[in-house]
Amino acid sequence: MLCAAMALARARTEFAPWTGTWFFGVGPRGLAWVAALAMLVPACHRDDPSRASRASRASRANDRAPPVADAEVHPPKPAPATPERRPEQTLKWLVAGGGATPEFNQVSIEQDLGLAATVLGAQSPAGALLFASGRRGKVVQVEDATPRGDELRRKLGDLFAPRGGRLAHYRPTKLSPAGPATSEYFLATLDEQLAREGPPLWLYLAGHGDFGEGPAGNSLGFWGQSQVDVQTLAKHLDLAARPVRVVVTSCYSGGFAELAFLAADPKLGPAPVERCGLFATTWDLEASGCDPNPDRRVQEGFALHMLHALRGQDRNGSPLASSDIDFDNNGRISLLEAHTRARIASRGIDVPTTTSERWLRVHARPLPDRGLPARTTPEDAAVIRAFTHEFPQLAEPAQARAELAGLEQQIADIRQQLTRAGQAEDAAYRRAAAELLARWPALDDPWHPDFEPTLTAHAAAIGQQLEHSQTYADYVQARAASLDLDAELGVLRGRTARLERYVRALDNGLLAARLADQGGTRWNMYQQLLSCERAEPAELAERAQGPQGPSASPHGT
């Protein structure tokens, strides 16, 4: 996320992650969507003031499951270390992420990063976790079980300056990171590790994604309102002395599928060193996640499914039958199989993708229809089986594609309705604000020296104004209308995501058949990407003697 982070924090158009409320954005396909349920809370937002309504940021606390105890599996505690001191030994895994500011550092991100470090750390202690501001400060946002503070102030804040965090509190992290997840610290740590010959490096990144101009322009937000875009990460990975497996769970994370190419540019050919990636969603779509509610039972997101799947579990930690995760029947679980489990099981708005999928879409040239049989991988075959069972009336690919096109048209129609509703809401806001400010000019500026004296002396009169004002009632009604459309669109977006996963699995087989028919180095590279994506966590446990000796210390300490 953080899409011009502070511009959004100051604008009247931001997403309200602190309450689990939703916004809508417009993608390059001309679609708009929002999340309508807590499980569909998007992991990012777009800086699009002309389209996002004020309602999309309003509190929906009563529609959410109440927060429960903030409990989750966390990685083993490393020995005390100076947070700013980067790991000295060769790492096998590096987990990094968090929000750019506390407002965007929701507890579910912390929980996902902790789970990633636990899963990878169970295979090898030779890893490092970088998180938000490191070990300093109260930076983790946790939703309040009940509203706090003065009701009148909440109403005024919602009217004049909606922003995240007002229905949440902040606490120190429960993790024990080796350092902060600033872009500078992360890239310096990454460079030091990539320069060392040795075993493959597993790189897991989580947080908020930002939408750029084209896939390679997408980025991931880091602490301190910094970011790393696809091209920048590719520039660093191009110099790697060892293979890399990348997982990114943010919105628009599919942009990082360009890492399949040198300098993240398809025209330049494949990357110079073995690397691959698995991502929560395509380059032009949002992802579920980033929830301030610590109750894992009500969260939804790609990471929750994939990380548990790597351990042979469903999203709740219960054991999976081998048929539900071991899709190639080899008795082990790969990254790609865990990714596939998320494609099948997630009820969020994610449409997961990979570097091999991206390679197919670049290099599988259109061919005359010769009736080539699909070259479907075991993983895609599992997706097709699952969704054929879920959508029996859409068993024929043509039917599925037609249904998807119809859902996308419905999304486009609701987008237009949301645009009109947002305009009506903003107009209602202006009228309500003008009425209040005519009597109390400093009421929209809590930093003005007259604000506190005004509120102290006239709180009762201001409350009466809000209670009896028709213009304010019109604003509340307009806000509710936008929220209703948000909810309708969110449900539709969830349905569309599941169907799109099905259609993409069908397309993958057809594209692979075309590429196989062409043969040559491009087909071979596709096979190499698949092999990389099928890496198993057990490779982390293999002993490898690098320049720094065997790796054996948890979390880079």
Image: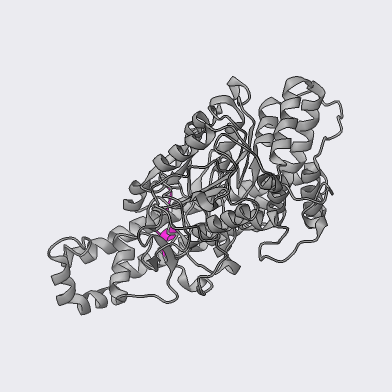
**Of 77 and 235, the residue lying toward us:** 77
Measuring from the top left, give residue 479's x and y in whole percent.
41, 63
Residue located 81% across and 44% down the image: 378
* 441 relative position to 463: left or right: left
In the image, residue 60 lies in the stretch drawn in magenta: no
Residue 349 in sight in this render: no
Measuring from the top left, give residue 338's x and y in whole percent.
70, 51
* 339 relative position to 204: left or right: right
Residue located 51% across and 61% down the image: 77
Question: Which of the 4 image quadrants contains residue 442?
Answer: bottom left
Measuring from the top left, give residue 356's x and y in whole percent.
69, 35
* 411 relative position to 17: left or right: right
Residue located 79% across and 54% down the image: 386
**Of 236 and 468, the residue lying toward us:** 236
Measuring from the top left, give residue 119's x and y in whole percent.
63, 55
State which region is magenta.
51-58
* 338 relative position to 125: left or right: right
Residue 123 in sight in this render: yes
**Of 434 and 281, the residue lying toward us:** 281
